[in-house]
Image (cartoon, coloured by chain):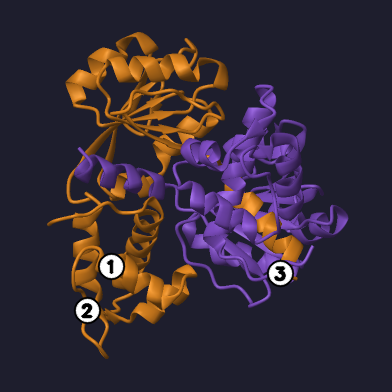
Chain colours: A orange, B purple
């Protein structure tokens, strides 16, 4: 599949469409229009068609998309037809919540290692994964062919953990700490600010009522 | 301030700009260009200017924006110059992580009540907030003038909790459960899929390397 430079906002929307298509498939729904997808995720149907058009021709005019087929394409486009191996660094409340989040496992994301500096946490298990000390990081990355490091440590140590992940060869990092991190140009970094969603609600509460 | 219909993607970006401006201010930086804001959050500088243009004229050509001033405007635009009162329903790992997340408190979001159906959790405290049983929901909403309900209960009970929040008069809901929820047209609903960020990394790992 030839893929041109895709805007990140499109990739985010494709992820959301794929979630909705999973839901439709589970409900036994076989076809869906761009309008129905659009309505369910809060964008215009033109946006849905434009996002999908980056990847070729989908759907039939007047009929819409076959849910199964479109979900299959999106799964492939998003790289979710393969398993991604994950290490979580930081087994506090948020790290533990992510480790236990069923949505990850169902979608090809395998949590292979969980590390924490706290001796009281080391040795405990989250689901079937043992919490281990930070000094096994490089070893576990190699052993499990880790693709993604999730950072849920306090801000003060986030850059240090990032440097260790980069040095160990982890190509992608998802940062939940509030710290702005520096990574080499060939490392993929994505920052998650849990308060963004509350800010959007704040905006809507302020102006749309 | 007259505000036209703003695309949700713009509001999300404004939230991210405000985070970056907080960071710049904390670093003691006084002026910033649209290019610098754009680079730091991964969009084009034209996008930054377009997003800000919805709300009037900001910045000076050739000089850029005064960090303090722009942050003040964004804070006002996003409705973050007032306090929003929150109830969290579901004090499991994710609910607890959100209750303890410092980023919320710093930005005008006050967690006023935390409810859970589990007797073993009721009576414990998260920071300074007591975990209480679900049946005090309507009472707490009224008492604390709750604006936002955060749902972190299992999927099976998410709709029931939503109905209770709506009945109690909560105008906005942030849903972390994987269930698609039904709400009346005048209730603001925002769904958070924690796996979207991993899917974007999956896409980038698949195609950009």
Seen from the viewer's position, the closer of residues B163 and A104 is A104
At 53% from the left and 68% from the top, the residue drawn is B181
Nearest the camera: B9 or B24?
A: B24
The answer for how far apart the CA atoms under marks 2 and 3 are is 35 Å
Q: Which x, y percent locates residue A25?
A: 29, 71
Q: Residue furthest bottom?
A: A62
Task: Please name whichever residue, B183 or A65, is drawn nearer the observer in this view of the structure.
Answer: A65
Q: Is residue A84 left or right of residue B37?
A: left
Of callouts 2 and 1, the N-terminal one:
1
Figure check: B141 above or below B34: below
Which residue is labeled 3 in the image?
A208
The residue identified by callout 2 is A59
Which callout, 3 or 1, points at the residue further toward the start of the chain? Answer: 1
The image quarter in which residue A29 lies: bottom left
Precedes in sequence: disc 2 or disc 3: 2
Q: Count residues near mark 2 (Cα–Cα under 10 Å), then give few for <14, some for 14-19, many for 20+.
A: some
Say if mark 2 contacts mark 1, CB within 8 Å. yes
Q: Is residue B90 visible?
A: no
* Residue behind mark 1: A52
Judged from this view, the residue extending furthest toward the right is B143
Cα gap from disc 2 to disc 1, whole angstroms: 10 Å
**Mark 2 falls on what kind of element?**
loop
Q: Chain of mark 1?
A: A
Indicate the chain on which mark 3 is placed.
A
- Residue A16 appears in the figure: yes
Q: Give above or below for A197 relative to A204.
A: above
């Amino acid at each position: 599949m030839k893929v041109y430079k895709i805007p990140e906002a499109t990739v985010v929307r494709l992820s959301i469409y794929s979630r909705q298509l999973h839901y439709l498939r589970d409900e036994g729904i076989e076809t869906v229009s761009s309008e129905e997808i659009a309505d369910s995720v809060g964008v215009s149907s033109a946006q849905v068609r434009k996002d999908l058009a980056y990847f070729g021709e989908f759907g039939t005019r007047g009929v819409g998309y076959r849910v199964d087929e479109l979900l299959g394409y999106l799964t492939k486009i998003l790289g979710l037809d393969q398993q991604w191996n994950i290490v979580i660094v930081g087994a506090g409340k948020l790290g533990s919540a992510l480790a236990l989040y069923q949505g990850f496992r169902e979608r090809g994301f395998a949590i292979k290692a969980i590390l924490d500096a706290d001796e009281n946490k080391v040795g405990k298990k989250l689901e079937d994964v043992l919490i281990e000390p930070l000094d096994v990081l490089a070893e576990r990355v190699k052993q499990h062919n880790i693709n993604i490091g999730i950072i849920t440590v306090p801000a003060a140590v986030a850059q240090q953990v990032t440097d260790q992940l980069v040095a160990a060869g982890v190509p992608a990092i998802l940062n939940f700490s509030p710290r702005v991190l520096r990574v080499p140009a060939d490392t993929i970094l994505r920052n998650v600010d849990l308060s963004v969603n509350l800010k959007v609600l704040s905006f809507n509460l302020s102006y749309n009522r």
